[in-house]
Image (tube, rainbow, N blue to C red):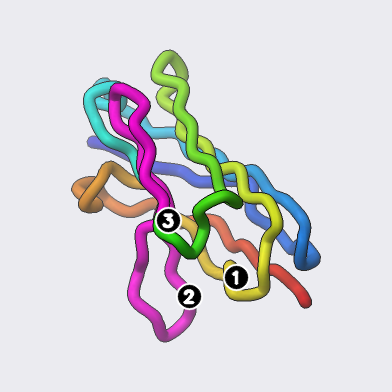
Amino acid sequence: QVQLVESGGGLVQAGGSLRLSCVMSGSWFSLNTMAWYRQAPGKQRELVASITRAGDLYYPDSVKGRFTISRDNAKNMVYLQMNSLKPEDTSVYYCNAINGIYPWGPGTQVTVSS
């Protein structure tokens, strides 16, 4: 069974940076488009970045130019480099394949203070 475990969150001041990591168990990692999502209290989970097997990238306008997704297929890892963080980026961040087809991991809390 696929398991996802996120790490790297924390408390940071506005304008700061964090790098999130996610490891996926199982042998299907390299076949999937992987993505990072976030969910703030009382809000729906939203997509913040995705990367295809070929390395094609997608970012919504809210994070474009500030967040960078990358992957290491040899390690079954996906990363999210977050720069110029804003208080509105405060959320629990999750990784998953696109469309969230695997069981969700615990997520990692990112808190950005103003």
Mark toward the start of the polypeptide (3 vs 1): 3
Whether tag 3 and tag 2 are in contact, CB under 8 A, the answer is no
Residue 56 covered by magenta stretch: yes
Q: Which residues are magenta?
A: 36-59
- Determine which residue is flagged by label 3: 48
Q: Residues within 10 Å of mark 3 (few under 14, many from 20)?
A: many
Image point (42%, 56%), residue name: 48
Tag 3: amino acid = Val
- Classify residue 49 as left or right of residue 2: right
- Determine which residue is flagged by label 2: 40
Tag 2: amino acid = Ala
Q: Nearer the viewer, mark 3 or mark 2?
A: 3
- Determine which residue is flagged by label 1: 90
Pick whichever, 39 or 23, lies toward us. 39
Q: Disc 1 versus disc 2: distance between alpha carbons?
A: 7 Å
Q: Disc 3 versus disc 1: distance between alpha carbons?
A: 12 Å
Mark toward the start of the polypeptide (3 vs 2): 2
Mark toward the start of the polypeptide (1 vs 2): 2
Image point (50%, 53%), residue name: 64
Name the image quarter holding the N terminus. Answer: top left
Picture coordinates of residue 29 (x, y %)?
30, 27
Q: Is residue 69 above or below residue 90?
A: above
SS at mark 2 in the image:
loop
Q: Is residue 37 above or below residue 51?
A: below
Q: Quadrant of residue 37?
A: bottom left
Whether tag 1 and tag 2 are in contact, CB under 8 A, the answer is yes
Residue at the outermost bottom position: 42
Name the image quarter holding the C terminus. Answer: bottom right
